[in-house]
Amino acid sequence: METAIWWVREDARLHDNAALVAAAEADALLPVVVVDPRQYGTQPYGGPQSFTFEKTGAYRAQFQRETVADLRQSLDERGSGLLVREGRPGEVVPEIATAVDADTVHFQALPAPEERDAAAAVVSALADAGVQTASHWTTTLHHVADLPDGVDGIDDTFTPFRQSVEQESRVREPLPEPALPPTPALDRLDGGYGSLPTLAELGLEPPAYDDRGVLAFEGGETAALDRVQEYVWEGDHLRAYKQTRNGLLGPNYSSKFSPWLAAGCLSPRYVKREVDRYEAERVSNDSTYWLVFELRWRDFMAFQTAKHGATFFTRGGIREREDVDWADPGSDPTAREQFERWTAGETGIPFVDATMRELNETGYMSNRGRQNAASFLANSLRIDWRRGAAYFETKLVDYDAGSNYGNWAYVAGVGNDSRNSYFDIVEQARNYDGDGEYVRHWLPELQGLPPGYVHEPWEMDRGEQRAYGVVLGEDYPEPMVDLAASYEEFR
Ligand SMILES: Cc1cc2nc3c(=O)[nH]c(=O)nc-3n(C[C@H](O)[C@H](O)[C@H](O)COP(=O)(O)OP(=O)(O)OC[C@H]3O[C@@H](n4cnc5c(N)ncnc54)[C@H](O)[C@@H]3O)c2cc1C
């Protein structure tokens, strides 16, 4: 009689899950979720990464709760079950393994240092207890074993990486859902299957959802598969993805798959297979190619994290730049005030403020918004980019270590590209929000401004400000920096 444990990590799904498939070969299988208190609260790992913000904020915590609840329901419906425990995985998983006499623990390998350390602690404690472990790479489109030159050999710029995988690798077919063996007896474990901690128990206020948000993101594999069905098939939005993907308002300018991909309730290989099917049944064009292209960006960031480890998260980044004089809001009061205005969406630059208010009120921000909000902090204010990345880490419903820190580092000029990637924010706003609809959506105080001023209210004289009902310093802040001057360093 062989007993296996599936330690569920960022792979809460039954479809295309190699860890589950392997674990389901045993005679008895116990799926286990461990809620690690270090994922919540401030400075949980004691390191500088999270500074003083909550590591996981309410939007993502709620999404995770829904994700686990959905997994539990799916497992129950199949005659299995889900054990939920709180604590450090390195302590909790071995206790459970001993109590149910497990032979093997199967789990997802993750690329970032904190997650790797957590897995190493589990593996070492289980080795002491005489329990076998097997890790499975299930997070990316391309399997790590299929990289033409391995993780250490991948290029540090995206294009050569993409070309190498497009030409010399293949995407494996998603694995079917396995039949599930029964769970083992839990009589030596106190607390039965256990319940999920509430947000209050995790020290979090319930998130306040704003119906101006792009989508009501609901955690779990069921909602993930529904979203793919709706976006690709029912709405037929994939055919125009490349033209719409830089949008700012509404559910369908982009796929919105990111929260489900990040939580692992959606497999990127499943998405690719749906794209292939769509190409065969409906249309194959630059849009269908581009969605997979973006998934390769996600892969790139994951493999870069695996390649560079802790260096990926340092201020100088993988380029180990020492030449930028970053301001530190922890020690510099001016930088602190500027940082707080940025987080609150009170910078006086409408496009930046709209993106930050959207993030604060919904947990989501478009890719275009993220690039501009990040560039403003890192390039226009020259505030330590890791503070901004840590703020995003708290707030984002789709936070993913590699994609978040990798994109921040890229924009800040310390990451995977040597070009200066500052953004001319007013020009971007004019290009992507020409009539100001997005800015007015999130900044109702600018409702009365015509398109000519909505992105640059500082261009109005006092008389115009009064005429349009937006007096700077009273109704809306004065801009906190001279944007044009802030670009000089990069020209
Ligand atoms: C400063 C900054 C921080 C970011 N932080 C995150 C993060 O924490 N988590 C996250 O998933 N993405 C992050 N991104 C990437 C990107 O903004 C989001 O993936 C995207 O906006 C999510 O919306 P979508 O699913 O509709 O994307 P779509 O345009 O529909 O793209 C499909 C999928 O491709 C992947 N993808 C797209 N763009 C990127 C990219 N630039 N890098 C990596 N993967 C990408 C995502 O998995 C996305 O779901 C960040 C980008 C920037 C500039």
Image: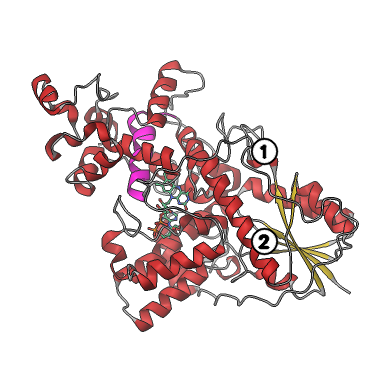
- Amino acid type, callout 1: Glu
Protein image colouring: secondary structure
Q: Position of residue 176 (x, y in %)?
A: 61, 77
- Give the SS element for disc 1: loop
Residue sitting at x 68%, y 67%: 75
User: Does the segment drawn in magenta span residue 373?
Assistant: yes
The residue labelled by disc 2 is 72
Number of numbered labels in the structure image: 2
Mark 1 is surrounded, within 10 Å at the Cα level, by few (under 14), some (14 to 19) or many (20 or more) other residues, namely few
In primary-sequence order, the first of circles 2 and 1 is 2
Q: Position of residue 483 (x, y in %)?
A: 25, 30
Is residue 314 rendered to the left or right of residue 351?
right
The residue labelled by disc 1 is 201
The relative height of residue 48 versus residue 21 in the rendered view (above or below) is above
Tell which of 249 and 192 is nearer to you.
Answer: 192
Is residue 324 rendered to the left or right of residue 248?
right
Which quarter of the figure has residue 323?
top left
Q: Position of residue 136 (x, y in %)?
A: 67, 65
Q: Which residues are magenta?
A: 367-383
- Give the SS element for disc 2: helix
Residue sitting at x 38%, y 26%: 341
